[in-house]
Image (spheres, rainbow, N blue to C red):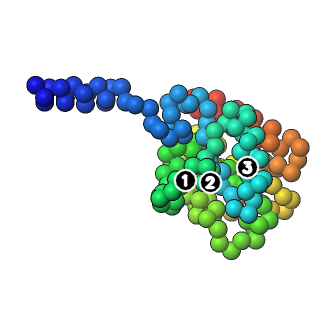
């Protein structure tokens, strides 16, 4: 009898799993995309304002300071998010990043470029979206990907619209 109850419980949990605790994975939120924000800590104030505008437009974000938990192995967690949870990878380009010799952003970007290479050639959607926060801050490694200029007044609206338009192609 106990084995039958155990089996029935397993079948029930398999057929009707509890929703994940991570908001990036929640099926009730699948109607909105998840944007991974890649940036230098030096630029946190600008990125926080960007995150707030995206959130206000109904776009979820993944940002290390908000989503990493104590004890997380950041390298593994970030790779998992880039490969399994993020729908878009926004690279915040500033002069401080361009001038940096080393930064976690470059590790994140390499991982995002690996994921981007594995996409279907016929896939019309974007994954990596470079954004420019300061004139002349564009990274050479992203020169073949159209960037959105957030130094322009309409830049943030263009980013939001790009994500929303692209997202409708994916769902």
Q: Residue 50 — which label?
A: none
The residue pinned by badge 2 equals 65
Above or below, 42 against 4 in this view is: below
| Marker count (numbered) | 3
Residue 93, position as x, y percentages in the image: 75, 58
Above or below, 22 against 10 in this view is: below
Verify CB contact (< 8 Å) between mark 2 and mark 1. yes
Q: Residue at x 80, y 42 (%)?
A: 156
Q: Mark 3 or mark 2, which has the lower sequence index?
A: 3
Q: Mark 1 or mark 3, which has the lower sequence index?
A: 3
The quadrant of the picture occupied by the N terminus is: top left
| Circle 2 residues within 10 Å: few <14, some 14–19, many ≥20 | few
The residue pinned by badge 3 equals 48
| Circle 1 residues within 10 Å: few <14, some 14–19, many ≥20 | some
Q: Residue 68 — which label?
A: 1
Residue 149 visible at all: yes
Residue ranking furthest to the left: 1
Q: Measure the C-alpha gap from mark 1 to mark 3.
A: 16 Å
Residue 89, position as x, y percentages in the image: 63, 49
Q: Residue at x 55, y 31 (%)?
A: 30
Residue 141, position as x, y percentages in the image: 69, 63
């Amino acid at each position: 009898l106990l084995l039958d109850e155990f089996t029935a419980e397993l079948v029930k949990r398999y057929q009707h799993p509890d929703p994940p605790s991570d908001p990036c994975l929640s099926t009730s939120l699948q109607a909105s995309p998840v944007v991974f924000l890649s940036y230098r800590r030096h630029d946190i104030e600008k990125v926080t304002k960007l995150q707030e505008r995206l959130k206000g437009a109904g776009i979820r974000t993944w940002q290390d300071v908000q989503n990493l938990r104590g004890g997380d192995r950041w390298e593994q967690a970030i790779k998992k998010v880039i490969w399994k949870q993020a729908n878009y990878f926004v690279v915040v380009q500033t002069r401080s990043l361009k001038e940096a010799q080393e930064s976690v952003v470059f590790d994140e970007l390499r991982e995002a470029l690996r994921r981007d290479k594995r996409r279907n050639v016929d896939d019309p959607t974007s994954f990596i979206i470079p954004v420019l926060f300061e004139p002349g801050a564009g990274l050479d490694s992203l020169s073949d990907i159209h960037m959105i200029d957030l130094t322009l007044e309409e830049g943030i609206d263009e980013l939001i619209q790009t994500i929303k338009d692209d997202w409708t192609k994916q769902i």
